[in-house]
């Protein structure tokens, strides 16, 4: 008896949860910390003050990212649980209507009515709530919200991203700090955009240009504000 060969596919959608949090955290770490450093440096602050500001920005930013991700993803998770509870109640109240609803979803995708009804009944016989969660609500194991994972990933990657512009403060000469910080941080951002795109299977140049543009804009604005404030003071 000939067995059909197993067709194995490797999809990247399973990385959505942690990849989004990782890219967001690292990008925010680089942009916010480098912008803060450039803004303070443009105001003609001392090197020690710049370093303190950058370190404080790193700690505050990492905690903010962790808390923000946890709260926002927890809200998504709460919504998913509420929808599942509502769907569970509907399945308990009227299983026939829910079967017809699921079959209707398959028919809308191009399946003929008899096949759609048969598929809906077979899937619901095995796991009615799972079938409706996947095909009616769009909730699956790969994309379901994971607050702890998102919070820890964002905090860790923010810290890693913020450490890069902070290291420049320690290593760069004071008279060239703003220029080196800007160039170095933009290079870090370009590299981050390329890595994130590569990991997620997206176009590398599009992601690189996008993240670099917004980083440059943020640094330019904070440098201008720092210059104005420093002159006024």
Image (cartoon, rainbow, N blue to C red):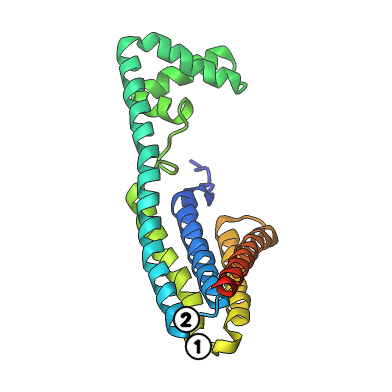
Residue 194 in the image, given as x and y percentages of width and height: 61, 65
Q: Which residue is mark 2?
A: 167
Residue 84 in the image, given as x and y percentages of width and height: 35, 27
Dot 2: few (<14), some (14–19), or many (≥20) neighbours within 10 Å?
few
Mark linked to residue 34: none
Cβ atoms at labels 1 and 2 below 8 Å apart: yes
Q: Quadrant of residue 108?
A: top right
Q: Nearer the viewer, residue 74 or 62?
A: 62
Residue 12 in the image, given as x and y percentages of width and height: 53, 51
Relative to 175, residue 233 above or below: above
- Residue at the (54%, 68%) spot, across then down: 35
Circle 1 SS class: helix
Q: Is residue 67 left or right of residue 35?
A: left
Q: Which residue is mark 1?
A: 171
Q: CA distance from mark 1 to mark 2?
A: 6 Å
- Residue at the (67%, 57%) spot, across then down: 203
- Residue at the (60%, 59%) spot, across then down: 197
Circle 2 SS class: helix
- Residue at the (40%, 56%) spot, across then down: 65
């Amino acid at each position: 008896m000939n067995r059909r060969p197993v067709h194995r596919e490797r999809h990247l959608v399973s990385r959505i949860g942690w990849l989004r949090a990782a890219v967001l955290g690292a990008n925010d770490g680089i942009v916010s910390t480098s912008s803060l450093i450039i803004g303070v440096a443009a105001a003609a602050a001392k090197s020690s003050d710049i370093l303190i500001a950058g370190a404080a920005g790193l700690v505050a930013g990492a905690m903010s990212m962790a808390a923000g991700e946890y709260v926002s993803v927890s809200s998504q998770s709460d919504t998913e649980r509420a929808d599942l509870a509502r769907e569970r109640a509907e399945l308990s109240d009227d299983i026939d209507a829910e079967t017809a609803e699921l079959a209707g979803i398959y028919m809308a995708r191009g399946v003929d009515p008899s096949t759609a009804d048969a598929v809906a009944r077979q899937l619901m016989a095995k796991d009615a709530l799972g079938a409706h969660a996947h095909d009616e609500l769009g909730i699956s194991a790969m994309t379901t919200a994971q607050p702890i994972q998102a919070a820890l990933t964002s905090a860790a990657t923010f810290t890693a991203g913020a450490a890069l512009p902070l290291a420049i403060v320690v290593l760069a000469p004071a008279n060239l700090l703003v220029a080196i910080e800007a160039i170095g941080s933009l290079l870090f951002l370009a590299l981050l955009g390329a890595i994130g795109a590569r990991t997620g299977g997206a176009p590398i140049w599009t992601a690189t240009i996008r993240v670099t543009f917004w980083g440059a804009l943020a640094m330019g604005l904070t440098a201008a504000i720092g210059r104005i404030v420093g002159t006024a003071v």
